[in-house]
Amino acid sequence: MRTDSLNELIFTLPASPDLRRGACLVVDPDLFFNPNTEHAAKQVCLRCPVRGACLDYALGCGEKHGVWGGTTEAERLELLRQRPPVRRRHPAECGSRSRYLTGCRCEECREANRQYNVRRRVNGYRPPVKDLVEA
């Protein structure tokens, strides 16, 4: 791989504004993708101003090859194993207007939507007839 090939790769990455200042852009890219030169690649990463952004990119996209952000493939896998699981926002529970708006028509969700509309009417808002939801 030629140095300009790595430059092309870095400049097309989603995180490229940060990674464009990487120390890797001025050395032979083969250094980062050869198991025999991992130590030398890590030394380049140690003085890199965007090491953290590079590691974040590699962890975020699941980069499986080469040294990224001063870590090898095995080290990145270990970091991913150690990370706490990502807590995804749980969908709204039944009995809420949010759940009703996503299509649930159980009794609790219909009641939550009805109460929401009643509160809006009490406060002076009258939705157009086409916005009224049939119960």
Image (cartoon, rainbow, N blue to C red):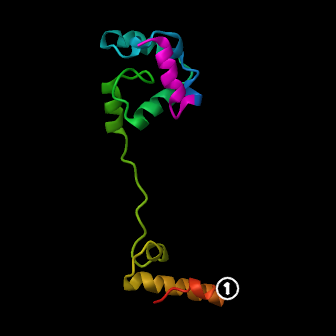
Relative placement, left or right, of 34 versus 4 is left
Q: Mark 1 — residue? A: 125
The residue lying furthest to the right in this view is 124
Q: Nearer the viewer, residue 71 or 11?
A: 11
Quadrant of the image for the N terminus?
Answer: top left
Question: Is residue 47 visible to us here?
Answer: no
Question: Which three-letter amino acid code belongs to the residue tagged 1?
Answer: Tyr
Q: Give x and y (percent) for residue 27.
A: 49, 9
Q: At 63% across and 89% down in the image, what residue appears? A: 121
Q: Is residue 74 above or below residue 131?
A: above
Residues drawn in magenta: 1-16
Task: Say which residue appears at 42% left-offset and 79% top-offset.
Answer: 95
Residue at image position (36%, 47%) is 85
The answer to whether residue 91 is left or right of residue 114 is left
Q: Quadrant of residue 125?
A: bottom right
- Secondary structure beneath dot 1 equals loop
Query: At 55% across and 83% down in the image, what residue appears?
Result: 116
